Image (spheres, rainbow, N blue to C red):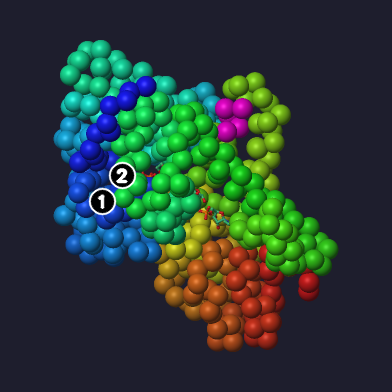
Amino acid sequence: MTTIAPPQIRTICCIGAGYVGGPTMAVIADRCPDIQVLVVDMNTTRIAAWNDDDLAKLPVYEPGLDAVVGRCRGRNLHFSTEVDAAIAAADMVFIAVNTPTKTRGIGAGQASDLRWVEACARQVAKAAVGHTIVVEKSTLPVRTAEAVKAILEAAEDTDTTRSFSVLSNPEFLAEGTAIRDLENPDRVLIGGESTTAIHALAGVYGQWVPPEKILRTNLWSSELSKLTANAFLAQRISSINSIAALCEATEADVEEVARAIGSDSRLGPKFLKAGPGFGGSCFQKDILNLVYLCRHFGLPQVADYWESVVALNTWHQHRIAALVVQKLFGTVTGKRIAILGFAFKADTNDTRESPAIRVCRDLLEEGAILAIHDPKVDPDQIALDLGQPVGESWLHCDAVADAVTGADAAVILTEWQSYSELCWDALAPLMRQPAWVFDARAITDSLAVCLAGLNHWRVGCGMV
Ligand code: NAD
Ligand code: UDX
């Protein structure tokens, strides 16, 4: 353990300008005006979008992000593709690159693909100057820091003017509320061996986060805590969605059940909203990674337990698509169905693992013609996710009214605020009767929908 005073951090480099790197570094730059923050990425298009004069064109849509970037960009926040130069200039390098599920080889379908993290470690090993604190910001399997350290130590051996400390500092922001989460986090977690390095990173966060919210652990606890937090959160969603299915079969109402159980202070009210199943780039990936690790460490029962959280989620999404088919007289072939919302949750343009993908693919498989509306998702992204270009089997609509015109059903899959304010009296006459509203987010007023002459289904509501 080192005991010297923590180094003053003057320059930070963040490798990865994605949903985590961009917003996180923007908030650090905003709250730490004395630190120069260099965000680098090998994706030139993404960097160009971060540098666009028009803040509406930033590559990540997050409420409040444009204002933060607008304040700091060009002052102490810089986006570039000059990775080596940024590493060389930095006292601290964050690694915030993607760690998706492996698609081939050992652990395919479960383990995280660490090739981009390893590439970053090697690039830091090559380009760093003097002492560099390397911070794992990506979500990583427990004990990944061992590999990062091994690569950096090899670099120390070949050039003794360089040295490294490795910290784990997982990110807990949720998309759609990223700026709020970063500005006022429940906690900041720092795992590491060097108290000097931990102090240095705590000093950065300490410029706006109260000290009692900065938790210090060992490296491995920090890495594992991130996977565990996501597993527990996702487990709650699978739990409530399982009960939603039971409610639909028994005339109970999942919203009432959620309120009743959420009033128990031991359970709490958050994360009990039944929906179309969890999406997003993190939950499924991180649980599958946990499952892989458990099997690797000889704990098959623990692996099976967590795997069931993902299995329930997958089943629930297929269940919603099947239910739409069943209510529309058992066939949707050639029928137009309006899809309201494609993002995995409201207030983001991210579609990774969005429930809409599975539901839409199932409906397309049944021969439906989908008219898709989302206020923020680019149609090119939808085409990629559905594996087919816009055209015969699906259309993109800029307005909800266009999407529902001639449709037998509207399926609400994202909880955009604007969808809760729709005037069904005006929309109903545009639809082919008898028509349905399938509300997988429970944001519509069932009475208003029914009074408009439409059939209504709401997730977890067994009352007819
Ligand atoms: P992302 O795909 O949006 O961004 C990652 C970026 O890293 C990409 O732009 C990619 O081009 C860049 N990159 C990859 N390798 C590079 C390299 N060698 N050099 C330069 N750039 C490189 O991913 P994200 O959503 O920001 O997630 C990043 C990490 O944070 C993941 O491990 C994820 O699990 C974790 N995380 C994500 C969230 C979230 O809400 N998205 C929340 C918490 C944690
Ligand atoms: C999650 C974690 O919340 C965050 O801490 C971590 O850093 C990254 O992963 P994110 O995936 O961005 O964040 O969003 P989150 O709000 O957790 O929602 C994930 C999915 O669960 C979404 O599809 C959302 O619609 C769904 N969800 C969430 C529900 O269906 N019901 C709920 O009650 C809460």
> Secondary structure under badge 2?
helix
Question: Residue type at mark 1?
Answer: Cys
Residue pointed to by mark 2: 204
Range of the magenta residues? 290-294
Residue sitting at x 74%, y 64% = 260
Label 2 Cα crowd, 10 Å radius (few <14 / some 14-19 / many 20+): some
Question: Residue type at mark 2?
Answer: Val
Residue pointed to by mark 1: 32
Instruction: State yes or no: Cβ of the residue under disc 2 lies below 8 Å from any atom of ligand 1.
Output: no
Q: Is residue 309 magenta?
A: no
Q: Main secondary structure of the magenta part?
A: helix
Instruction: State yes or no: Cβ of the residue under disc 1 lies below 8 Å from any atom of ligand 1.
Output: no
Q: Residue 250: give x, y in percent of width and height.
A: 83, 63
- Answer with left or right where residue 131 lies relative to residue 94: left
Q: Is residue 292 magenta?
A: yes
**Quarter-of-image position of residue 304:** top right
Label 1 Cα crowd, 10 Å radius (few <14 / some 14-19 / many 20+): some
Q: Nearer the viewer, residue 93 or 401?
A: 93
Quadrant containing the C terminus is bottom right
**Mark linked to residue 265:** none
Residue sitting at x 33%, y 20% = 151
Q: Nearer the viewer, residue 170 or 102?
A: 170
- Label 1 near label 2: C-beta < 8 Å? yes
Residue sitting at x 53%, y 64% = 414
Q: Residue 337: give x, y in percent of width and height.
A: 58, 68
Residue sitting at x 49%, y 75% = 418
* Above or below: residue 402 compared with residue 119: below
Quadrant containing the N terminus is top left
Q: Residue 148: give x, y in percent of width and height.
A: 37, 24
Q: Nearer the viewer, residue 262 or 95?
A: 262
Q: Residue 316: give x, y in percent of width and height.
A: 67, 52
